[in-house]
């Protein structure tokens, strides 16, 4: 079944990425003006050979058309304009861009593609910096609007990804620096051409002649630009505003539903509004870390009224429900658009000082980031029986010895201890540059734990203490890494399916009487020789499919397969 919401989101994302890449390369070309105008023109030749290729030309302007239409559609769907500051900036830029873009496209698209104009950098500088300084300002404003709109969209797409988290400074420097460098390149080239024209006035005439510019072409370009900017744009903007107010008036009168909150608040909203928009309209604080794009669950609500009349989840919401195994009453407020009266209970409720703290806290710590990582669980076997008959201080002494050796082994192999759970330990390996190296580090850490444990057992044997035994489980995959807890009790940790599988593999070492069990994903990432390992397909609680895993009687056996 076709899911319109998913198609719309992916189409906006793909078209937006194409346009952002175009603008990025265009600004890089501008930046070459810092060297010279000739270098700028040479870069333009490469730029045009790529972007004005017959196929890529239609890809680019197809992406522009799709992104524009879907942007209009997204704004038209909104029932409330209560938005975060970032959303206001992005959407305001989106509304203003067509006005400024119209004059630019009149030259670079209409003029060059259909009127035979050679829109070289020299010609653009003559038509703005030298003959029309106001047009120069317009170009600067357009650059700022387009780059701001695109940057907010791209950062929203990658801000919770591992590569962005590791290189945040680089990305932010690029976003702030590239438009300044590009504008500086354009100014530098403009000054160079201006100085050349002063020493040789014929230069301007030669450049205009080489551009194939005529009074007739200029008149056509100006006419189209004025038509788009001062007639078409105001009409479209007026029609949109009229549509919004007329629709709201009609829906309020004939097509509204009531959203009731469990604290007694009631709000009438247009049928088809999302529950997140309903909360915004009511002036309620409703958490939504991802901005209402279905990429988190902080806006989730429990529906306390009849579930039978709810619309089915779209694919965006359904993927979250499947992943987290939500029951039918749990829905995402940003995706659920009820058609009938509904009663809900938002599950993340904040008091006033918490709201203030969240506004100024680090967003990564607040919501976590999704990254590919390696999780290890290590647990002592039969320690409860071992501790019977011993003094509590002796038990603590042995445990601390064990915790120290595990910590040393993990940290020596570029891992970090996440938490101690009774006589168990959870560790994360994510400090190396690739997932392959992190998997190898985890296996080496497991082998080192075995070595250190044998040394500890030798030490304890003099006290007639039964040798300590343990089980280790390792799995690799995506997990949410972030600060969990509150106040001084908050710590960095990992949650998600990868953690659950690693824990389950550690428990399965009991069933297979082995010391180490790790998933096939770890084996593949670590580039192990699987022929040297014992494999098994095992059922993991909560998983429909069987998981292929490898087990070793002693953890150091895995190292021999490296």
Image (cartoon, helix red, strand yellow):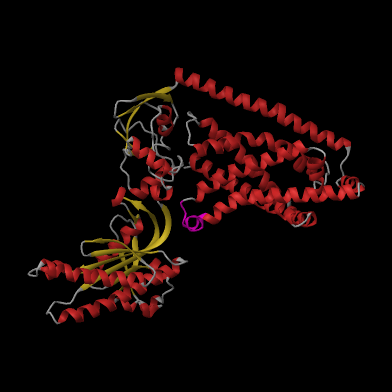
Q: Which residues are magenta?
A: 160-168
Can you name the residue that lies furthest to the left here? Answer: 389
Asked whether the viewer can see residue 340, the reply is yes
Which quadrant of the figure contains the C terminus? bottom left
Q: Nearer the viewer, residue 281 or 332?
A: 281
Locate residue 28, reporting x and y percent: 68, 54
Asked whether the viewer can see residue 550, the reply is no
Q: Is residue 411 left or right of residue 206?
A: left
Locate residue 337, reporting x and y percent: 42, 32
Locate residue 287, reporting x and y percent: 39, 38
- Looking at the magenta stretch, what is its main secondary structure? helix
User: Residue at 21% of width from left, 69% of height from top?
Assistant: 400
Relative to 252, is 317 above or below?
Answer: below
Relative to 263, is 355 above or below?
Answer: below
User: Residue at 62% of width from left, 45% of height from top?
Assistant: 147
User: Residue at 59% of width from left, 43% of height from top?
Assistant: 148
> How many numbered badges does the structure rendering display?
0
Relative to 484, is 474 above or below?
Answer: below
Q: Nearer the viewer, residue 433 or 62?
A: 433
User: Residue at 45% of width from left, 20% of height from top?
Assistant: 252
Q: Is residue 161 magenta?
A: yes
Q: Nearer the viewer, residue 409 or 358?
A: 358
Relative to 252, is 349 above or below?
Answer: below
Q: Is residue 346 magenta?
A: no
Q: Is residue 546 left or right of residue 209?
A: left
Q: Is residue 75 left or right of residue 458?
A: right
Locate residue 45, reporting x and y percent: 77, 55
């Amino acid at each position: 079944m076709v899911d319109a919401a998913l198609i719309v989101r992916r189409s906006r994302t793909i078209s937006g990425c194409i346009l952002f890449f175009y603008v990025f390369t265009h600004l890089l070309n501008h930046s070459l003006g810092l060297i010279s105008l000739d270098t700028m023109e040479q870069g333009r030749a490469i730029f045009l050979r790529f972007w004005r290729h017959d196929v890529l030309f239609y890809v680019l302007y197809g992406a522009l058309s799709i992104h524009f239409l879907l942007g209009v559609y997204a704004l038209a769907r909104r029932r409330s304009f209560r938005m975060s500051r970032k959303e206001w900036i992005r959407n305001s830029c989106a509304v203003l861009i067509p006005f400024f873009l119209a004059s630019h496209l009149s030259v670079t698209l209409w003029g060059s593609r259909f009127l035979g104009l050679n829109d070289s950098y020299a010609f653009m500088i003559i038509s703005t910096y030298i003959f029309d300084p106001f047009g120069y300002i317009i170009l600067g404003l357009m650059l700022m609007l387009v780059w701001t709109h695109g940057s907010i969209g791209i950062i929203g797409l990658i801000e919770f990804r591992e590569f962005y988290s590791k290189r945040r400074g680089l990305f932010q420097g690029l976003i702030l620096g590239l438009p300044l460098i590009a504008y500086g390149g354009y100014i530098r080239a403009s000054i160079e051409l201006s100085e050349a024209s002063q020493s040789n006035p014929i230069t301007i005439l030669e450049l205009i002649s080489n551009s194939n510019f005529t009074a007739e072409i200029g008149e056509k370009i100006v006419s189209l630009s004025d038509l788009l900017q001062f007639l078409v744009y105001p009409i479209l903007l007026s029609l949109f505003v009229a549509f919004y107010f007329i629709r709201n008036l009609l829906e309020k009168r004939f097509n509204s539903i009531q959203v009731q909150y469990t604290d007694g608040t009631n709000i009438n909203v247009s049928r088809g509004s999302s529950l997140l928009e309903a909360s915004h309209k009511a002036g309620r604080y409703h958490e939504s870390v991802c901005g209402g794009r279905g990429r988190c669950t902080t806006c989730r609500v429990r529906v306390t009224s009849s579930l039978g009349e709810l619309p089915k989840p779209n694919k965006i919401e359904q993927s979250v429900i499947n992943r987290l195994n939500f029951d039918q009453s749990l829905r995402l407020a940003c995706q659920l658009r009820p058609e009938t009266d509904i009663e809900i209970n938002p599950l993340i409720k904040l008091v006033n000082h918490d709201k203030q703290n969240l506004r100024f806290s680090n967003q990564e710590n607040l919501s976590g980031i999704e990254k590919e990582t390696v999780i290890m669980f290590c647990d002592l076997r039969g320690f409860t029986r071992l501790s019977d008959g011993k003094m509590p201080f002796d038990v603590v002494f042995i445990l601390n010895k064990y915790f120290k050796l595990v910590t040393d082994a993990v940290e020596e192999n570029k891992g970090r201890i996440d938490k101690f759970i009774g006589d168990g330990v959870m560790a994360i390996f994510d400090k190396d540059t690739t997932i392959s190296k992190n998997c190898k580090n985890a296996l080496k850490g497991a082998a080192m734990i075995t070595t250190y444990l044998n040394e500890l057992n030798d030490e304890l044997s003099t006290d007639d203490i039964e040798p300590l035994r343990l089980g280790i489980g390792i799995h690799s995959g995506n997990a949410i890494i972030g600060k969990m807890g509150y106040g001084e009790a908050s710590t960095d940790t990992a949650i998600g399916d990868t953690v659950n599988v690693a824990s389950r593999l550690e428990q399965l070492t009991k069933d297979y009487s082995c010391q180490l069990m790790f998933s096939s994903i770890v084996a593949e990432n670590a580039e192990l020789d699987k022929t040297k390992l014992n494999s098994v397909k095992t059922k993991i609680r909560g998983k429909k499919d069987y998981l292929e895993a490898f087990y070793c009687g002693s953890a150091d056996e895995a190292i021999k397969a490296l």
